[in-house]
Amino acid sequence: MSRLLRSLSFRLTLIYAGLFCLSVALLMGAGYWLRVVVPMDQTRHMVEREAQTLRAIEEAHGIGATAEALDRRAQHSDGAKAFHALLAPGGHVVTSNLPGWPARSIERMSLIEADTFVDGVEIDYDALVLDQMLPDGTRLLVGRDVEELTSEAEILHFAAIWIFGVTVVLGLGIGWLMSLAIGRRIEAVTLTARQVMEGDLTGRVQVRGSGDDFDRLGETLNHMLSRIETLFQAVQRVSDNAAHELRTPLARLIGRLERLEQAAGDDLTMRVAASDAIVEANRLQQILSALMRISRLENGRHPLELQRTDVVQLLEDLAEFYQPEAERLGIELVLSARRPLVADLDLDLVFQALSNLLDNALKHAGAGRRIEISATRRPEGLDLSVRDDGPGLAADEAARITEQFYRGRDSGGVPGDGLGLSMVAAIAQAHGAALEFADAQPGLRVSLVIPEHRLG
């Protein structure tokens, strides 16, 4: 329901339904005013004039003349039926065609039921009556039938309830249907965008051929995606060709430097220079290989070799491999994991990712520190983490830490080329996993969260 309320189409439909209800209310209010209020006011004024005339007759000619005037009025009334009651000062009824009235005078205009029986059949009347007490103690009630007006008022009230109810239900229903229809079209665009973001540049928005706004938007996006795919493929071909062309010269350069080192003989300066050059050439070759592998992983061109993996055994092998280096640096290396923990992983890639994380921790933690490798189940999946109690990561560096060749401000003098975490991020992306950095207070905790669907 919350998602539906956040839908723009649904909110617009609610606004339209509200405006429609308001317009219906105004129209019905205008109809009620014209059909009920205005005629009722006219009847009220008529009764007041008649009552004033009859009061003048009573004051001038007495109660008998007033009774005769009331009877003539009842027999020759034009339009709505005329009602009256004339009571002498002692309460004796002089003349009346009202079936009943209040026991005491209320000295104001009121609505009285004035039902009558003709040949045993009840005829409903509602009389708008002005009840007044004359100076000599005579009570005079003068009124007119407003049954049609009160009936119409009831009908309009009943109709208003039903119209507003139906309008609200239709508004909500139409809003839900519109939101559903528009949401499906938007979801198709969203899924295509996610597909492209995940590295599949062949994704395209489905076009229905109706020529509507969504089709035109889809066609525009598809043209844009086709252009992006073409440009990306061109860049990819250039980078692949450049990498391929660089491999051979680098291999030749390393071979020649090695021969030069051997030919240097006793010339120590020449041997050292040749050895340093070989180291730099090898480093350049490693960087080139790492960049190509990261590119293949990010673009989905490196197929995963998934296998059922004992995660605890994987971490034990990792800890055993790095234990000598940790002891050399004076760092305590701890493993925290309990069987059974099984997942479908590319064993080599995940081992490399965890190796990069552990290698970074060993480089930056410092002597006397503690590094913990752990594996735990979370609602999101399997959490493989490396935690240290070193200096940690600056808050403003977290957003850039996985960029290629980026090195933190505290990395001066620490060996590395700034591609380790880029490789980890690419491996995480290939597995559909999340890479998380958290403040360990103190230190840094880096987690590779393998999604639930890959767990055994």
Image (cartoon, rainbow, N blue to C red):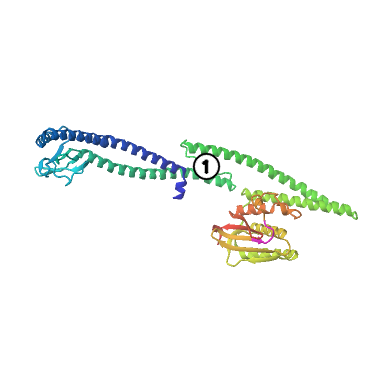
Looking at the image, which is closer to me, 151 or 319? 151
Name which residue lies at 67% across and 51% down. Answer: 293
Q: Position of residue 130 (x, y in %)?
A: 20, 39
Q: Is residue 121 above or below residue 308?
A: above
Residue designated by label 1: 205
Q: Is residue 146 left or right of residue 233?
A: left
Q: Name the image quarter holding the C terminus.
A: bottom right
Task: Tell me the quarter of the picture where residue 47 sits.
Answer: top left
- In the image: residue 188, left or right of residue 274: left
Q: Against 400, is 391 above or below? A: below
Residues 156 and 366: in front is 156
Q: Is residue 292 above or below residue 328?
A: above
Magenta region: which residues? 386-392
Residue 336 visible in the snapshot: yes
Residue 335 position in % (x across, y down): 65, 66
Q: Is residue 255 magenta?
A: no
Query: Can you give x and y, in whole percent of width and height, for residue 354 in the image?
Result: 66, 59
Q: Nearer the viewer, residue 408 or 325?
A: 408
Q: Position of residue 4 (x, y in %)?
A: 45, 47
Task: Indicate left or right for 119 with 273 as reference.
Answer: left
Q: Is residue 391 magenta?
A: yes
Q: Residue at x 64, y 50 (%)?
A: 399
Neighbourhood count class around disc 1 (C-alpha, 10 Å): few under 14, some 14–19, many 20 upward:
many
Element type where label 1 sits in the image: loop
Using the rendered view, name the quadrant where residue 444 is placed: bottom right
Amino acid type, callout 1: Val
